[in-house]
Image (cartoon, grey):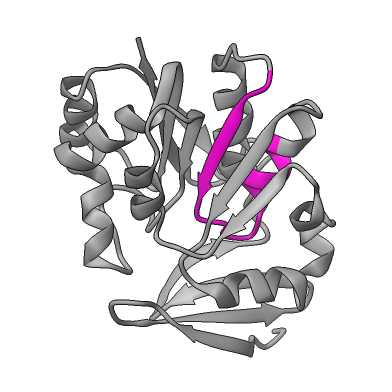
């Protein structure tokens, strides 16, 4: 069996530690014993971007992605957005961006240096709260979804107040897209109660259509 090698670790603001682990050519980001993400599974993270893009009608859209993860969502967005689009990426843990530029540079594929991209080292919730009607799409892949693991503060993103802030940060017709490792009927209702037209999609973890079933909610601001 190929051993797992610890590449680096990083403290998560608010408590806990993330670790970058490599096994052969595969990378994993861990939180404690939990595997937050793997380079072997990119399908649903890519779908977060591509399916949001399909729902946005703006000619030069501004996307906000939180957080960076392994960059699958960012790269999928850049592959479909035009030259006039812009993408802001909010990543709370700066080491995650260091890992993307360092050990995982082959996965990053120069996307962080794309002129359409701006990296914000800040809590995506704070970035959302600072914006009023500035985004055409907000894509959240934070803490495994509403049933979070890493930071209690992330719960605010998925609360009624957090959803209200996200709606306020979107332009008319904008889309809030939320990735989750598992279904959550209570959250789906909360999203609708926040004034979004909700579309819930179940999608496989792997681009091949295999792997665990994940959930993406798309909430359209009317």
Residue under the point 39% across and 60% down: 123
Q: Can I make out residue 178 in this image?
A: yes
* 106 sits left or right of 207 in the view: right
Q: Can I make out residue 208 in this image?
A: no
Residue under the point 57% across and 57% down: 68
Residue 73 position within the rendered picture, expressed as x and y whole percent measured from the top left? 62, 44
Residue under the point 56% across and 44% down: 205
Looking at this view, is 181 or 218 the one in front? 218
Let me know if residue 70 is in the magenta part. Answer: yes
Residue under the point 31% across and 29% down: 168
Image quarter hosting the N terminus: bottom right
Image quarter hosting the C terminus: top left
* Magenta-drawn segment: 60-77
Residue 162 position within the rendered picture, expressed as x and y whole percent measured from the top left? 23, 42
- Say which quarter of the image contains residue 95: bottom right
- 188 in relation to 94, above or below: above
């Amino acid at each position: 069996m190929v051993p797992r090698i610890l590449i680096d670790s990083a403290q998560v603001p608010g408590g806990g530690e993330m670790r970058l682990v490599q096994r052969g050519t595969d990378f994993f980001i861990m939180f404690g014993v939990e595997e937050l993400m793997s380079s072997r599974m990119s399908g649903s993270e890519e779908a977060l971007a591509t399916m949001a893009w399909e729902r946005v009608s703006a000619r030069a859209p501004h996307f906000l992605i939180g957080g960076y993860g392994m960059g699958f969502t960012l790269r999928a967005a850049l592959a479909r957005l035009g030259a006039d689009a812009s993408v802001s990426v909010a990543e709370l843990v700066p080491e995650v961006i260091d890992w993307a530029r360092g050990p995982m540079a082959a996965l990053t594929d120069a996307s962080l240096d794309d002129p359409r991209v701006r990296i914000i080292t800040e809590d995506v919730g704070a970035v959302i709260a600072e914006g009023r009607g500035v985004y055409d799409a907000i894509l959240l892949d934070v803490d495994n979804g509403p049933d979070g693991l890493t930071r209690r503060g992330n719960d605010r993103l998925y609360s009624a107040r957090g959803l209200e802030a996200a709606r306020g940060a979107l332009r008319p017709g904008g889309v809030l897209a939320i990735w989750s490792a598992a279904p959550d009927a209570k959250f789906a209702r909360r999203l609708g109660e926040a004034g979004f037209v909700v579309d819930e999609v179940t999608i496989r973890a792997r681009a091949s259509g295999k792997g665990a079933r994940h959930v993406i909610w798309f909430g359209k601001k009317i």
